[in-house]
Each structure stands twice: as C-alpha cells, then as structure tokens.
Image (cartoon, helix red, strand yellow):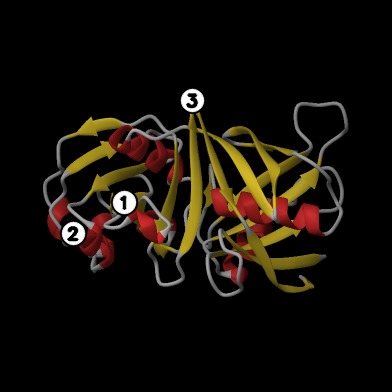
Amino acid sequence: MRIRIVDAFTDRPFAGNPAGVLLLDGDGFPADDWMQNVAMEVHHAETAFAHRLPAGGDADWALRWFTPVTEVAMCGHATLATAHVLHTTGAHEGPVRFATRSGVLVATPAGDGALTLDFPTAPLTPVAVPDGVAEALGAEPVAVFDTGAAVGDLLVELADEKTVRGLTPDHKALAAYSARGIIATARADDPSRGYDYLSRCFFPNVGIDEDPVTGSAHTALAPHWSARLGQADLTGLQASPRTGLVRTGLRGERTLLTGRAVTVIEGELLA
C-alpha cells in the first residue's frame, strides 16, 4: 500500500504541517487498531485514511484521521493533504466531498495548486478566564472563548504578536483546560507583511505539544478575527517553528480555508 507524507498549508517542503496520507483499497476501513498503529509509526500530528465511496451518494470518499495516540473528529491540514494526493495522482478530479465524523467536508481546486476546504464555522462562546490558565500559558489573556465540541479548544486572545511568538507554555498544565488544547492568538502588528492575525496551537490532550499549522483551529480564528477586524476574508499565520499560512473566508455557518500542499515522501507500507 502506498503511503505519502504531505506538507500542508505551504508551497515548499519542510514547512507547513506534515500529514500521512493513505488511499485505501476496497470499500471500507481496516481495523481501528491497525490505523492507530500506522499513525503511531508515521508519528506526525495526523495521518489520514481514505477510501472511495460508491458513485451517486452525498460524498466521494470516506475519510478518518488519527494522531499518534487517538482518532480525532476533525483535521484541516490532513484533509487538505488528502485532497492534494487525490488530485496530483489523478485519483479524483474537481471538487471532492469527504464523508467524515464532522459531516461532509468539501475540497475544491482554487487555482495555482491551492485547494479550498469548506468546513463548519466553530461557535464561539465567551467564558471567564479559567483559574491558572495564564500561568500555564505564560501570558495574561485579553479574552477567552470556548470553541464548541467539534473543535474542542479554548481560544485565548493575547495582547500582541510578540506575546504569541514568545510563549513557552507548560503543556502538562494546559491539558486541564479543554478537550484538545489551546489556540493562542493576536492581531498582526503589521498586516502589510501578508497576514492579518497569527496563532499558535497547543494540543497536549491528543499527544501534540504544538501543532505546526491547524486548519480546524481556523474555523474558530476566522469568525473571531472577522468580528474584530470587520473583514470576511483574512489571512492567518500560524507562528510555529515550521510556520504556515491559511487564507480564511467567513461565509456564515461555513468557513473557507485555502492553502497549498507539497508531497515530500512517497513509499510502500509493508505491514
């Protein structure tokens, strides 16, 4: 079986967020423990498993995502990576509809090798700053929002770009505050540099201390910064060491996430 490593939300190798991608033979998924073992062996933030669905239905491919320690309900960068593999290998042309635990997600070619993902917008609920979160994160929050069950994070707005870039959180302590982790964000100091806001994402509860670039987090970041900045279409920089750019478009209850991807490794899975 072919396995590929794809860097998502970047146009160059060794940047963005790497994901494993396996296009499965047949019309079903293998055993969960096998997929979990493959994801543990790949050891990237997520590994995606996809199989083709019969023609004429609501979706073209079934898609699931596993971190090295657990299955997750939504993953943006591995969805982008899977759509990239489908298009570059000729396995699928045009928009691709994925049946997932979060409903049908659509990836549409956007020109120049980019793809646009159509994801549900995360509901944001303001909450009081939880006791101890400032100490665990290493910075004082300006505002805190719950992102709902599908995303499963706390979105924490911080004072400025320098604060976000300088975070050195206590990952073990952060695990107490949400189902998945913390999205830390601030407005860009200078939007002329090509991004309107920046973020960093810490997900200790799914085995990821810091995620390089997180598509699903931008379903919460997009409505937050669209409200703050008064614009529906924005660009977010995820300021991890690998970095990546996500173009976001708020469309009511849907968020469009646009980015590119690069296949960096292709090989044979023997197990």
| Nearer the observer, 1 or 227 | 227
- Residue 92 screen position, x and y as percent: 83, 47
**Above-or-below relation of 265 to 193:** below
Q: CA distance from mark 3 to mark 1?
A: 22 Å
What residue type is disc 3 on? Answer: Glu
Label drawn at residue 241: none
- Residue 193 screen position, x and y as percent: 39, 61
**Above-or-below relation of 247 to 231:** below
Q: CA distance from mark 1 to mark 2?
A: 10 Å
Q: Write down the residue under mark 1.
A: 182
User: Of callouts 3 and 1, which one flags the residue occurring earlier in the amino acid sequence?
Assistant: 1
What residue type is disc 1 on? Answer: Ile
User: Of callouts 1 and 2, which one flags the residue occurring earlier in the amino acid sequence?
Assistant: 2
Label drawn at residue 136: 2
What residue type is disc 2 on? Answer: Ala
Q: Inspect this view and state whether residue 147 appears.
A: no
- Residue 58 screen position, x and y as percent: 76, 26
Indicate left or right for 254 with 181 as reference. Answer: right
